[in-house]
Image (spheres, rainbow, N blue to C red):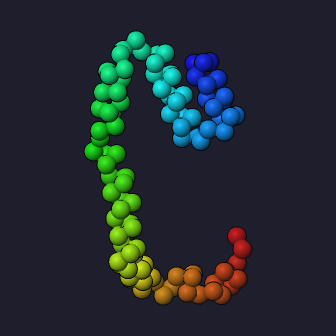
C-alpha cells in the first residue's frame, strides 16, 4: 500500500494528469495485490465494469442532452412553473417580510 501511495504522489508531483495517475496507481496496486496473471486481471476488471446499472449513467446524460437540444426541457420547466400554486411564496414577494419572524 505504501508503494502505491508513493507512485501516486510521485506521478502527481511530476505533473501527470490525475486520471492517468489514478489508473497507474491502481494498476500497480492490482499487480502487487494479486498473483493472478495479467489476462485474468483484465478479464476481472471488464467483468466488474459490465453492469446494467453503470450503463444507465451515460444514457441518462444522453437523454438530458437530447432534451436540451430538442427544446423539450424548456417546455417541461414552463409546465412545472405553470402548475405552481398561485399561493407560492415566489409569486408573493411581500410574503417574506409580512410574515412574523419566529
Q: How many marks?
A: 0
- Relative to 81, is 13 above or below? above
| Corner quadrant of residue 7 | top right
- For the C terminus, the image quarter is bottom right
- Relative to 75, is 34 above or below? above
Identify the residue at horizontal 42%, vertical 83% (top origin): 78
Q: Position of residue 48 (x, y in %)?
A: 33, 33
Identify the residue at horizontal 32%, vertical 21% (top origin): 40
> In this orientation, does residue 80 appear?
no
45 sits left or right of 25 in the view: left
Q: Nearer the viewer, residue 60 or 8?
A: 8
Q: Position of residue 26 (x, y in %)?
A: 50, 28
Identify the residue at horizontal 70%, vertical 34% (top origin): 13
Identify the residue at horizontal 51%, vertical 22% (top origin): 28
- For the N terminus, the image quarter is top right
| Corner quadrant of residue 76 | bottom left
Amino acid at each position: 500500500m505504501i508503494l502505491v501511495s508513493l507512485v501516486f504522489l510521485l506521478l502527481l508531483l511530476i505533473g501527470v494528469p490525475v486520471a492517468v495517475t489514478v489508473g497507474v496507481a491502481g494498476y500497480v496496486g492490482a499487480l502487487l495485490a494479486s498473483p493472478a496473471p495479467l489476462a485474468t486481471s483484465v478479464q476481472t476488471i471488464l467483468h466488474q465494469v459490465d453492469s446494467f446499472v453503470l450503463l444507465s449513467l451515460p444514457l441518462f446524460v444522453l437523454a438530458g442532452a437530447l432534451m436540451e437540444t430538442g427544446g423539450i426541457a424548456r417546455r417541461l420547466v414552463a409546465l412545472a412553473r405553470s402548475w405552481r400554486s398561485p399561493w407560492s411564496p415566489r409569486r408573493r414577494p411581500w410574503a417574506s417580510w409580512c410574515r412574523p419572524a419566529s
